[in-house]
Image (cartoon, helix red, strand yellow):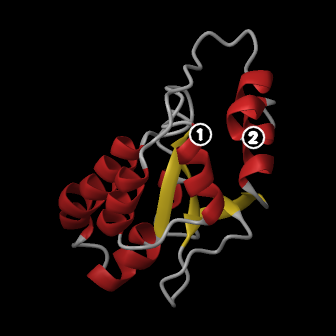
Amino acid sequence: MYRELILNLSKGNNWVKIQPPCPAEEIRRAQQVVGYPFPKELCELLQETNGDHYCLLSIQQIIENVERNREIWLPLFEEDYSKEKYIELVDRFIFFATNGCGDYYCYRVNEDGLPDETAVYIWEHESLGEKCWKKVAGSMEEFITRYYKGEI
Protein backbone atom coordinates (compact mmCIF):
# COMPACT_ATOMS: atom_id res chain seq x y z
CA MET A 1 0.00 0.00 0.00
CA TYR A 2 2.63 2.60 1.07
CA ARG A 3 5.11 1.62 -1.62
CA GLU A 4 2.51 2.08 -4.36
CA LEU A 5 1.30 5.33 -2.81
CA ILE A 6 4.83 6.76 -2.77
CA LEU A 7 5.52 5.59 -6.32
CA ASN A 8 2.30 7.23 -7.57
CA LEU A 9 2.87 10.50 -5.72
CA SER A 10 6.56 10.79 -6.62
CA LYS A 11 6.27 10.31 -10.39
CA GLY A 12 8.75 12.66 -12.02
CA ASN A 13 10.73 13.14 -8.80
CA ASN A 14 14.12 11.59 -9.56
CA TRP A 15 15.30 12.10 -5.96
CA VAL A 16 12.94 9.47 -4.58
CA LYS A 17 14.58 6.04 -4.50
CA ILE A 18 12.31 3.43 -2.89
CA GLN A 19 14.44 0.93 -0.98
CA PRO A 20 13.79 -2.79 -0.47
CA PRO A 21 11.74 -3.85 2.57
CA CYS A 22 13.32 -3.82 6.00
CA PRO A 23 13.71 -7.25 7.65
CA ALA A 24 11.49 -7.80 10.71
CA GLU A 25 14.50 -8.52 12.94
CA GLU A 26 15.96 -5.10 12.11
CA ILE A 27 12.66 -3.43 13.01
CA ARG A 28 12.66 -5.27 16.36
CA ARG A 29 16.27 -4.23 17.02
CA ALA A 30 15.47 -0.60 16.20
CA GLN A 31 12.55 -0.64 18.63
CA GLN A 32 14.92 -1.85 21.35
CA VAL A 33 17.42 0.93 20.58
CA VAL A 34 14.70 3.59 20.44
CA GLY A 35 13.21 2.20 23.64
CA TYR A 36 9.60 2.33 22.47
CA PRO A 37 7.39 0.10 20.34
CA PHE A 38 6.80 1.45 16.85
CA PRO A 39 3.26 2.26 15.74
CA LYS A 40 1.72 -0.45 13.57
CA GLU A 41 1.66 1.75 10.46
CA LEU A 42 5.36 2.60 10.82
CA CYS A 43 6.18 -1.12 11.00
CA GLU A 44 4.01 -1.69 7.93
CA LEU A 45 5.80 1.10 6.05
CA LEU A 46 9.23 -0.31 6.92
CA GLN A 47 8.09 -3.77 5.82
CA GLU A 48 7.38 -2.27 2.40
CA THR A 49 10.33 0.11 2.05
CA ASN A 50 13.40 0.78 4.18
CA GLY A 51 13.43 4.50 3.36
CA ASP A 52 13.31 6.41 0.11
CA HIS A 53 16.50 8.57 0.13
CA TYR A 54 14.20 11.60 0.00
CA CYS A 55 11.97 11.98 3.04
CA LEU A 56 11.56 8.60 4.72
CA LEU A 57 14.42 7.42 6.90
CA SER A 58 15.86 3.93 6.71
CA ILE A 59 15.90 1.81 9.86
CA GLN A 60 19.64 2.52 10.19
CA GLN A 61 19.01 6.27 9.97
CA ILE A 62 16.30 5.98 12.63
CA ILE A 63 18.79 4.23 14.93
CA GLU A 64 21.62 6.68 14.17
CA ASN A 65 19.32 9.62 14.87
CA VAL A 66 18.38 8.28 18.31
CA GLU A 67 22.00 7.53 19.17
CA ARG A 68 23.08 11.00 18.02
CA ASN A 69 20.34 12.65 20.08
CA ARG A 70 21.37 10.74 23.20
CA GLU A 71 25.15 10.75 22.83
CA ILE A 72 25.88 14.10 21.20
CA TRP A 73 22.95 16.46 21.69
CA LEU A 74 21.99 15.60 25.28
CA PRO A 75 25.37 16.73 26.71
CA LEU A 76 25.15 19.99 24.73
CA PHE A 77 21.77 20.82 26.23
CA GLU A 78 22.62 19.94 29.83
CA GLU A 79 23.32 23.61 30.59
CA ASP A 80 19.79 24.62 29.65
CA TYR A 81 17.70 21.51 30.35
CA SER A 82 17.60 18.72 32.87
CA LYS A 83 17.80 15.20 31.48
CA GLU A 84 14.08 14.78 32.21
CA LYS A 85 13.22 17.97 30.29
CA TYR A 86 15.44 16.89 27.38
CA ILE A 87 13.65 13.54 27.27
CA GLU A 88 10.33 15.40 27.14
CA LEU A 89 11.55 17.71 24.35
CA VAL A 90 13.57 15.28 22.21
CA ASP A 91 13.72 11.67 23.33
CA ARG A 92 9.97 11.07 23.55
CA PHE A 93 9.62 10.98 19.77
CA ILE A 94 10.05 8.27 17.16
CA PHE A 95 11.56 10.12 14.20
CA PHE A 96 10.94 8.37 10.86
CA ALA A 97 11.22 11.11 8.20
CA THR A 98 12.87 14.46 7.60
CA ASN A 99 12.32 17.55 5.51
CA GLY A 100 16.07 17.98 4.97
CA CYS A 101 16.20 21.23 6.97
CA GLY A 102 16.76 19.76 10.43
CA ASP A 103 13.10 19.12 11.20
CA TYR A 104 11.74 15.61 11.60
CA TYR A 105 8.40 13.90 11.22
CA CYS A 106 7.58 11.61 14.08
CA TYR A 107 5.22 9.93 16.47
CA ARG A 108 5.06 11.23 20.02
CA VAL A 109 5.40 8.71 22.82
CA ASN A 110 2.99 9.17 25.72
CA GLU A 111 4.06 9.01 29.35
CA ASP A 112 2.95 5.36 29.46
CA GLY A 113 5.72 4.54 26.94
CA LEU A 114 3.34 3.90 24.04
CA PRO A 115 3.26 5.97 20.87
CA ASP A 116 0.28 8.12 20.01
CA GLU A 117 -0.84 6.32 16.87
CA THR A 118 -3.50 8.93 16.04
CA ALA A 119 -1.12 11.64 14.85
CA VAL A 120 2.05 12.31 12.91
CA TYR A 121 3.91 15.39 14.09
CA ILE A 122 6.59 17.67 12.76
CA TRP A 123 9.33 18.22 15.33
CA GLU A 124 10.86 21.64 14.64
CA HIS A 125 14.41 21.92 15.87
CA GLU A 126 14.36 25.74 16.05
CA SER A 127 11.62 25.61 18.68
CA LEU A 128 13.29 23.33 21.22
CA GLY A 129 12.62 25.57 24.20
CA GLU A 130 9.00 26.05 23.20
CA LYS A 131 6.44 23.54 22.04
CA CYS A 132 8.57 21.98 19.35
CA TRP A 133 6.00 19.66 17.78
CA LYS A 134 2.73 20.09 15.99
CA LYS A 135 0.36 17.68 14.30
CA VAL A 136 0.58 17.50 10.52
CA ALA A 137 -1.39 14.32 9.77
CA GLY A 138 -3.68 11.78 11.38
CA SER A 139 -2.08 8.73 9.79
CA MET A 140 0.94 7.56 7.81
CA GLU A 141 -1.10 7.52 4.61
CA GLU A 142 -2.20 11.13 5.14
CA PHE A 143 1.37 12.15 5.99
CA ILE A 144 2.82 10.57 2.85
CA THR A 145 0.09 12.05 0.67
CA ARG A 146 0.44 15.55 2.10
CA TYR A 147 4.25 15.47 2.04
CA TYR A 148 4.60 14.34 -1.55
CA LYS A 149 1.94 16.81 -2.67
CA GLY A 150 3.95 19.61 -1.03
CA GLU A 151 1.28 20.44 1.53
CA ILE A 152 3.61 20.05 4.54
Calculate the distance from the C-alpha at mark 2 to the C-alpha at mark 1: 8 Å
Residue 36, image quadrant: bottom left
Position of residue 35 measured from the top left corner of the image (x, y, whole percent): 35, 72
Identity, as a three-letter code, of the amino acid under mark 2: Met
Q: Is residue 31 above or below residue 54?
A: below
Residue beneath the point at 65% across and 58% down: 41
Residue 47, image quadrant: top right
In the rendered image, is residue 123 in sight? no
Q: Nearer the viewer, residue 76 or 19?
A: 19
Q: Which dot marks residue 110?
A: none
In the rendered image, is residue 116 in sight? yes
Position of residue 118 measured from the top left corner of the image (x, y, whole percent): 74, 70
Residues tagged 2 and 1 counted as in contact (Cβ below 8 A): yes
Q: Is residue 33 above or below residue 8?
A: below
Quick one: quadrant of the C terminus?
A: top right
Residue beneath the point at 54% across and 69% down: 130
The residue carrying mark 1 is 48
Residue beneath the point at 47% across and 71% down: 37
The residue carrying mark 2 is 1
